[in-house]
Amino acid sequence: MVPDISRGSRTYGLLAYLYGPGKRDEHIDPHQVASFDGFAPDPGRDPDATLTDLTRVLDLRVNQLGDRAPKQHVWHCSVRTDPGDRYLTDAEWGEVARRVVHATGIAEEGDSDGCRWVAVRHADDHIHILATIVRGDLRQPRNAYDYKRSQAECRRIEKEWGLRELNAGDGTSAPNPTSAERFKAERTGHDRTPREILRETVRQAVAGAADEAEFFTRLTEAGLRVNKRLAPSGDTLGYTVALPGDRNRDGQPIWFPGSKLAPDLSLPKIRKRLAAGPVDQDHEPDDEPHIAHQDTPSSSRSQPSQARRQAALAAERATTALGLDDDEDAAAQLVGAGELLDALAQTSPAATRHELREAARVFERATRSHIRAERADNRAVRAAARGIVRAGDALGRGEDGGTTAMVLSTLVLLAIAAARWHTARGHAQQAAASAQAAHHLRAAYRAAARTPIRAMREQGRRLPQPVRQRHADTINAALPDHQLGGEPGWDALAATLDEAERAGHDPAALLKEAVEWRELDTADSVTDVLVWRIRRLGKLPATADAPRRRSTTTAKDNKTSTASRTGARTTPTQTDTSPAPVAPADPRSRGPRR
């Protein structure tokens, strides 16, 4: 049950809308379900009552005050049930209205001097409460924090009546579109309001921006109208943005300040984020694990794929930070992770674009809480976001598609870690947003990983049996508590270890480092997570690299398998590429699921 409060200056105008047909004839049978005294004129059911009569009754105290009356004297609260909730009767909606005006201080129960109000119903799933905020004693009501108090009362009603219980807010959420904005979007055939479109576009412009000038340049390049508020000195004090073609009844652009789009999009908040330090993605971070390897030449990788590899590392580090005790650092990493998702959403290939945009859209709620990142450093993850934006669109094929899957696999774990972090601190809305983002990221990962993982599986199935046995021994030794043979990705993991060995790595050491990087209990597929960690740590191609083996006997492979079980370092043997049976593990077993 969602309350939405606003204020206005025209009692008659709002009543005309509530009792009218609506913008698209969506209002059905407008009528009152409750009023301040139970006897207010009802133009919807009484043919002798008019809107003027009802306006006169509601405005009585306002008119008595004359010039001393508040200009914004109309208090308007719509209350809407969740689409999955049961049908509420008129009597139940009347009870909702009485409880809301009592909780907000508009008209407390038993107070004969409370404000005058009516509750109008013109649809099954919501009502509108209109009150004039002058009491019978000609004072204004004590209705501070009315939005928070109405939210709390709705949570109580949900629990008592068996309705869907929504998460309580904490005052850090972005403003919701008004009813007028939603109706306008529907009337013009859009699925989102200008406020929502502008919020997403501004967030994407912030993602990885090096400075304020670049931020404003991105806004202009995105096609927005931008208006800066300047001081006499010429310094920028603030900004507003508008969508081209979005105009009011007078034909003027409808401007939105950044702070009205989201609390963290005001210019001072954006400046604070940009001032955290320079954003540079020219080099990989110095603290990446160093493993002897034969790296794929950087020239052979596209810029999008290289940027995504570095983003996977930054996401891993942010995930680790969420498991530590430094709340300020964790909050900063969440802000950076939001930028990373915004960067991916605007450069993602077609197969993952929709799910990534949805993930970025919902995760932005998880980036805001009352925990402030005053002294924390999220330059690494912001640098990763900048690298992705600068690299441009990914093709979604070959190396690009593989590295997209690589970073998405890590981001799923990051979103799950964010949900746990927020839950532990009582941030219900942020935890729910993180979980919802994880859902969209899983869908995006499945789309991105389908082709590269399938190719790796096929490569793994073609490995000679002695080679497969050797890698199975390595896997079982590194993960004795996991039975991975039944996971669909086992063959891909075996193929990855084989590639690592042929590239000069010690597969056991590389796998051990991948396992110890972070816990695997929240992974949907342990094998998939390990595949991408090993490929990133070992600088392996993100797509299958088919082995080139000479046709020989398997004696050396048998020797190598024995040596690997005893911990001896061996040189990979080149053997026949004929098909081999599946891994020697119980096919009925399954890895843990998150």
Image: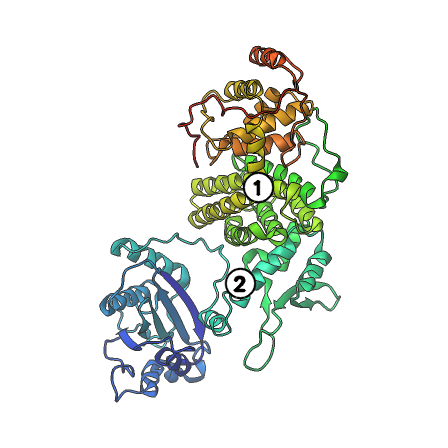
Secondary structure at badge 2 equals helix
Residue, far bottom? 48
For the N terminus, give its image quadrant.
bottom left
Inspect this view and state whether residue 277 appears.
no
For the C terminus, give its image quadrant.
top left
Q: Is residue 553 above or below residue 163?
A: above
Total number of numbered labels? Answer: 2
Q: How is the image coloured?
A: rainbow
Residue under the image location 50 percent in, 31 percent down: 526
* Residue type, numbered disc 2: Glu
Which is more foreground, mark 2 or mark 1?
1
Q: Measuring from the top left, give residue 568's x and y in whole percent.
A: 62, 11
In the picture, measured across the screen, residue 212 lies left or right of residue 579, that is right
Secondary structure at badge 1 equals helix
Q: Measuring from the top left, give residue 228's x and y in whole percent.
A: 68, 67
Quarter location, residue 541:
top right
* Residue type, numbered disc 1: Thr
Q: Measuring from the top left, give residue 360's x and y in whole percent.
A: 54, 52
Name the residue nearer the viewer: 344 or 567.
Answer: 567
Marks 2 and 1, the one that precedes in the sequence = 2
Residue under the image location 61 percent in, 51 percent down: 349
Q: Is residue 441 above or below residue 16?
A: above
Q: Residues within 10 Å of mark 1 (few under 14, many from 20)?
A: some
Residue at label 1? Answer: 451
State yes or no: discs 2 and 1 in contact (Cβ < 8 Å): no
Q: Measuring from the top left, give residue 100's x and y in whole percent.
A: 32, 64
Inspect this view and state whether residue 569 appears.
yes
On residue 196, which mark appears? 2
Q: Is residue 401 above or below residue 126?
A: above
